Amino acid sequence: MARFVFLPVASVLVDDPAVFEGLAAPWAAALAASGGERIAPERVAEPGLLAFLVLTGGTERMVLDAVACRRAAAGASGPVLLVAHPGNNSLPAALEALAALRAEGTSGRVVFLPSPEDEAGRQALSAAVEDMRVADALSRARIGVVGEPSDWLVASSPDGETVRSSWGPTVVPVPIERLFEAMARVDGATGVREAERFVASASACVEPSQRDLADAGRVVAALRAIVREERLDALTVRCFDLVLRSRTSGCLALAALIDEGVTAGCEGDLPSTIGMLWARLLTGETPWMANPARIDEEKNEIWLAHCTVPLSIVEEHRLRSHFESGLGVGIQGRLPLGPVTLVRIGGARLERLWLAEGAIVATGDDEDLCRTQALVRLSAGEAGELLRAPLGNHLVLVRGHHAERLRSWHQAAFGE
């Protein structure tokens, strides 16, 4: 299956098919070798990653018209890749077209191929295609917001249009009552089954009772049903309403959904949920969302803590109560030591990015912090920046060092 499709475009002055094909053939072969499938103009509105092979100057309007056709057919054009070469005013045409596309809100980039055989150019093309794959996935993603964002997230509650125009996903509001109604439809036996997999693999179950476990399992089944009904790729939940109204928690549910491939964030925090989804798509790593609970500027260290964590990324776990309330079920997981990347997006248009690399050097079990705790010592990036210019109260952690890859994607997407 092709990784992307591409449409060669040339000036109307190139009206001889043989001349057109002579211009296109060597470059089309290079794109095909990188996983591209050449298409005819009538297929331009079909779904999939789209590249334009810009053969000559005078093609800017052709590119814009084709993108407009895709937008009319699908409601959104998705990201666009323009491939330019050294001759026939290809590059200036590609630059002009991309500038116009970005001005109208379409993301994209230009890849310059010095020759059809240039290995560095082909590598740049492959990297750009992968970036476009992530951008395309984000543009098609549906993120459910179950309930309003938590009251304390005064800097982490962008509206749906801001999310759509900046990062691409569609925000799907889901009234919190739907969650409670879905929970009411889950019988106790189902709740017990959902919780059992957490119990079976736990090294201990400290505070939670059987009733607590069954109630937390009902949240798992209820949220999974909402994901299915709304065709969600990700969600974030006003989870403290569960504590206040049902004396349970969403910690098991969010952990379960993440391990099932649905990015799940806490407290209605949209920026962090987008950050989790983005980091997962780009790195392939399962994300963890947590509070920066303590910062040591001198040692360049951050203690992260939260009451939920995917079981797939911990070495062992205990079942505890939810920290702030003492109710429900939280997860106290022990993350493996080793390299990690920390991510936070924010700003009025969600255009700002904080990145840092380091390593988990210790885990903890302090009773005055959320249950899963990890000490990250930074080797690239400054913990103190979070104090001087914070973007919000949660960070996203993924295993491995990925800052350069994430930053490159962000710079291409936001033009910074």
Image (cartoon, rainbow, N blue to C red):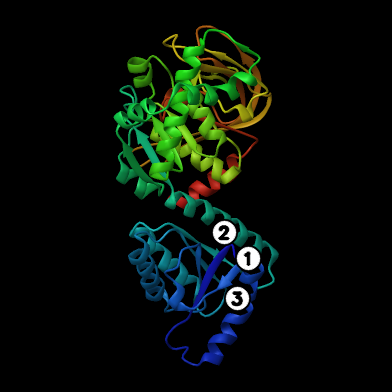
Label 3 and label 2: CA atoms lie apart by: 15 Å
The residue drawn where x is 62% and y is 59% is 126
Residue located beneath label 2 in the image? 129
| Residue 331 figure quarter | top right
Q: Amino acid at mark 1?
A: Gly
What's the residue at 49%, 40% (across, down)?
277
x then y, percent, for residue 90: 50, 75
The quarter of the picture where the N terminus appears is: bottom right
Image-quadrant location for residue 145: top left
- Residue where numbered disc 3 is placed: 28
Is residue 103 placed above or below 248 in the rendered structure?
below
Residue 62 place in picture, x, y as percent = 40, 76
In the figure, 33 relative to 173: above or below?
below
Relative to residue 130, is residue 352 depicted above or below? above
Lateral position of residue 296 relative to residue 170, left or right: right
Residue 249 visible, this angle? yes
Q: Which mark is residue 35?
A: 1
Choose the circle earlier in sequence order: 3 or 2.
3
